[in-house]
Amino acid sequence: MIDKRNFKDVWHTSREHFTSGDLKIIACGAMFLSHLAQSGFLYGFDCVKLADLFTLIGRIAMPLFCFMVVQGIILSENKEKYLKRLFIFALISEIPFDLAFSDSFFNIYSQNVFFSLFLGALMVYFWERIQISDINNTLKLCGGIILFLAISFIARLFMTDYDAYVIFAIALLYFAKDNRLLTALAIFVGFAFEANFTGMEFTIPYIVYLSIPLILLYNGKRGSYNRWYFYGFYPAHLFVIYLLKVILF
């Protein structure tokens, strides 16, 4: 079994600050604003500047979700059930996701982010299984590399939201899990794919890095929130956005 003591010592503090529930609320709120823009809803009202602002705010959501998935799979007492929940809600969310963003019941070219998070958590799960096996360290390393490449390939093949970029970010966050500063660095490097190149200009939507101070203020506690609200929020908010588009346009 992987030793969690150092991991818990790093993140579990007596400070008030943010619980995992607080971080999820922030992430869900930012994601909702972003999806109002990315689904075309706000652009339909010609609210271009507001839509651009909401899209920028939404950038903080993905690092928070990736961080919480790493925390979730490590701390879960039943990792198989945790993975099953992620996969089930990925399936549940697919039709609302496609309705909101493609106006169709199924779009083969884009799958919702729950699939990406599930694959990232699955990678961590199998990595830990490899580490506690009886094989030598060289084989463990080779197995881990093959695992990372295989999961990344699956994410890209099925065109999950953020595809292999999320897998890379989750891998970095997992290896940085025992150190807060390394976690901050993992987010900085893991989400550098947000960089945009335009001619001779090099820009990064720096808003994505506002997730770093939020995570550093995490106190390692779950909070009093019901986890099912967060699972249900994703498909529910997508379906609401779709209904608003149908009713108002």
Image (tube, rainbow, N blue to C red):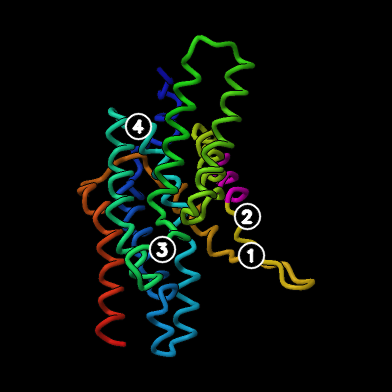
Q: Which numbered disc, 4 or 3, marks the residue closer to the eye?
A: 3
Q: Quadrant of residue 80?
A: top left
Give the residue pinned by disc 3.
Answer: 107
Give the residue pinned by disc 2.
Answer: 192
- How much space separates mark 4 and mark 3, taking CA atoms? 34 Å
Total marks placed: 4
SS at circle 1: loop
State which region is magenta: 180-190
Give the residue pinned by disc 4.
Answer: 75
Residue for point 35% across, 43% down = 15
Image coordinates for residue 179, horizontal then vertical, percent: 53, 35
Pick whichever, 153 or 183, lies toward us. Answer: 153
Q: Can residue 124 be seen at all in this image of the molecule?
A: yes
Instruction: Evaluate if marks 2 and 1 touch, with contact meaning CB atoms under 8 Å apart.
Output: yes
Instruction: Evaluate if marks 4 and 3 touch, with contact meaning CB atoms under 8 Å apart.
Output: no
Residue for point 29% across, 38% down = 84
Near mark 4 (Cα within 10 A), the count class, few <14, some 14-19 or many ≥20, is few
SS at circle 2: helix
Q: Earlier in the sequence, mark 1 or mark 4?
A: 4
233 above or below 7? Answer: below
Query: What label does residue 204 carry, if any?
Result: 1
Is residue 183 rendered magenta in the image?
yes
209 above or below 52? Answer: above
- How much space separates mark 1 and mark 3, taking CA atoms? 29 Å
